[in-house]
Each structure stands twice: as C-alpha cells, then as structure tokens.
Amino acid sequence: MNFIESIKNELIYSGIIDQALKVGDIIPNFILPNALSQPVELQKLLFNGPVVISFFRGSWCLFCNL
C-alpha cells in the first residue's frame, strides 16, 4: 500500500465520515473568501441553486489532494 492509500484508509477508519455533513443537512449562512480572496455568501449562492462546498487548503496539503 502506498503512502496516499495509507492516509486515505486512516481517514476512513477514523470515523470522520460519520461526522461530515450529509446531503440534505442544513447549515447556517456564512461568508468566506473564495480563491481570489473575495467574500462569498452561502445564502446568495443558494439563490441560484444547489451549492457544493469544498475546502482546499492548498497543493501542499496531502489530505486535500486525495
């Protein structure tokens, strides 16, 4: 098993998936910076339809690149 597979398995077995948001979960409105450091508000995005949220810390992050 390679290093990436090992990290992936570690995440799976940690139980973190059970704590993650699921389809249909409701979260409060928030404003976060986008990739260009411009503020983006969830409620405004939802006005146009469903939203997928992904937190990508950077190319240096092994977990983000799985």
Image (cartoon, rainbow, N blue to C red):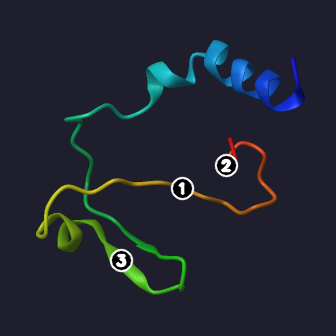
Q: Helix, strand, or loop for circle 3?
A: strand
- In-image side of 46 versus 34 (left or right): left
Which residue is disc 2 drawn over?
64
Q: Residues within 10 Å of mark 3 (few under 14, many from 20)?
A: few
Q: Residue at x 22, y 70 (%)?
A: 45
State yes or no: discs 3 and 1 in contact (Cβ < 8 Å).
no
Which residue is disc 3 drawn over?
40
Estimate the spatial distance between the alpha carbons at disc 2 and disc 1, rounded to whole Å: 8 Å
Residue type pointed to by label 2: Cys
Residue type pointed to by label 3: Val
- In-image side of 60 versus 12 (left or right): right
Q: Quadrant of the N terminus?
A: top right
Q: Residue at x 54, y 77 (%)?
A: 35
Which residue is disc 1 drawn over?
55
State yes or no: discs 2 and 1 in contact (Cβ < 8 Å).
yes
Estimate the spatial distance between the alpha carbons at disc 3 and disc 1, rounded to whole Å: 13 Å
Of the numbered discs 2 and 1, the one sitting upstream in the chain is 1
Of the numbered discs 2 and 3, the one sitting upstream in the chain is 3
State yes or no: discs 2 and 3 in contact (Cβ < 8 Å).
no
Q: Helix, strand, or loop for circle 2?
A: loop
Estimate the spatial distance between the alpha carbons at disc 2 and disc 3, rounded to whole Å: 21 Å
User: Residue 24, percent across and down?
Assistant: 19, 35
